[in-house]
Amino acid sequence: MNARVKRRNLVVEGLAQIGDAGLFLPTLLAAMPRSLRYFREIVRQIWFTGAMSLIIIMTCGLFVGMVLALQLYHVLEIFGGTASTGTVVALSVYRELGPVVTALLFAGRAGTSITAEIGLMRATDQLSAMEMMAVDPVAYVVTPRFIAGIIAMPLLCCVFSAMAIFGGHLVGVTWLGIDNGTFWSNMTSNVEVWKDVIDGVIWKGLAFGTVVTLISVHQGYTTPPTSEGVAYATTRTVVASSIAILALDFVLTAFMM
Amino acid sequence: MTQRRSYAVGTGLFIVLGFAALAYLATQTTSLVNVRHGDSYTLKARFTNIGQLKDRAPVKLAGVRIGSVQSIQLEPQKLDALVTLSIDKRFNQIPEDSSASVLTSGLLGDQYIGIQPGGSPDSFKNGDEVILTQSAVQLEDLIGKFLVNGSPGDKDKKKP
């Protein structure tokens, strides 16, 4: 096989993956009412994907806020505008960094484990065994993880943003000595609830949560039933999720502006 | 059973924490703090030029925020900007000969409406119009005038 054919196959393969994932979405949506019977399973998955990601999300949020405040303070000092450090930290976290960094971490922490788990179930024929027992694997295994991801992502975004604000306050006020009142009043007078908090944190969080978990469960469900196949599927989850998050972020921002 | 329980409790805690974080973001770090849901009444004011005044800009009296700009429209007949102000009901004793002007906070800050109180015993009622208004001072115009005229000192130097 020469290089050109190989490259074309790669493109065709990529397009086929996107189309396949797109077609998988209606299957998931159709299975949603049936999977509500497995409410316990949904709760357990929220615990696994959401609550277990809290520590990494909170730590990263804190450091993102701290480094933002540190950088901004020294740049704004040139223009005598250190008072707006809090505003810029809040706006950049709510609009871009919060949802995007949370989604990237979520893909790495939760997305990979979803893919690996479902992929191993496929490889060890557990999914076929469920079908034999008249349990629909899409409704019992795949859809609860999908629902849990969609619920967990916006909540994780909120926690990440709150920690980033806390980190920004820690560095800006406690360490660099911006006045506490100035920090908050500048922030509150320039940040808007609907445009910044709800549009940024909630809607972007929901969109990224849907995309990341869709890619994860799709990669897991269609993985080749070999150990190599599971490894590739896990890698593809992270790569595809990261590209999808950053591309979708640009499109969403362009729409929200 | 106990293991299932612990999942449920942990998940519940996680969801509560998420919503608490959202409530914190929405109430403590945004302009929601400044929004008062109390009753308000509206005043109208006409300006020949509003500069960069925007919807929801603050209305201040003696530097204290008493309301916000509700809407800005162009009056088609008079070619004036018609600004509707929403004032908090608590401040219902503003004299009706008070004047409104478009001011800038700081040298390059946002623009807001400043009310200078008059001396009339009667006060504004809902829907009244502020007759005495002063338009925004355009910084560009001021700089332009300064550049064209120069300072008096320069002229003296040029003459001899």
Image (cartoon, coloured by chain):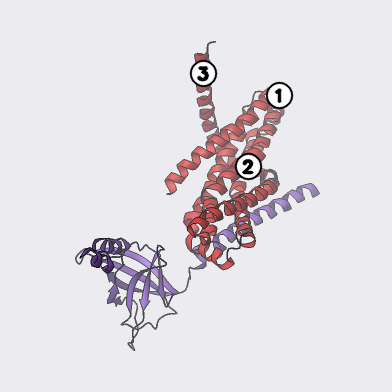
Chain colours: A red, B purple
Residue B106 relative to residue A70: left or right = left
Q: What residue is pinned by disc 2?
A: A105
Residue drawn at (58%, 66%) of the image: A179
Q: What residue is pinned by disc 3?
A: A7
Q: Identity of the amino acid at label 2? A: Leu
Looking at the image, residue B145 lies above or below residue A139: below
Q: What residue is pinned by disc 1?
A: A227
From the top left corner, tell me how far across and down residue A210 is, in percent. 56, 41
Looking at the image, residue B42 lies above or below residue A243: below
Q: CA distance from mark 3 to mark 2?
A: 30 Å
From the top left corner, tell me how far across and down residue A257 is, in percent. 42, 49
For mark 3, does the 10 Å Cα neighbourhood hold few (<14), some (14 to 19), or many (20 or more) residues?
Answer: few
For label 1, the SS is: helix
For label 3, the SS is: helix
Circle 1 chain: A
Residue drawn at (63%, 50%) of the image: A61
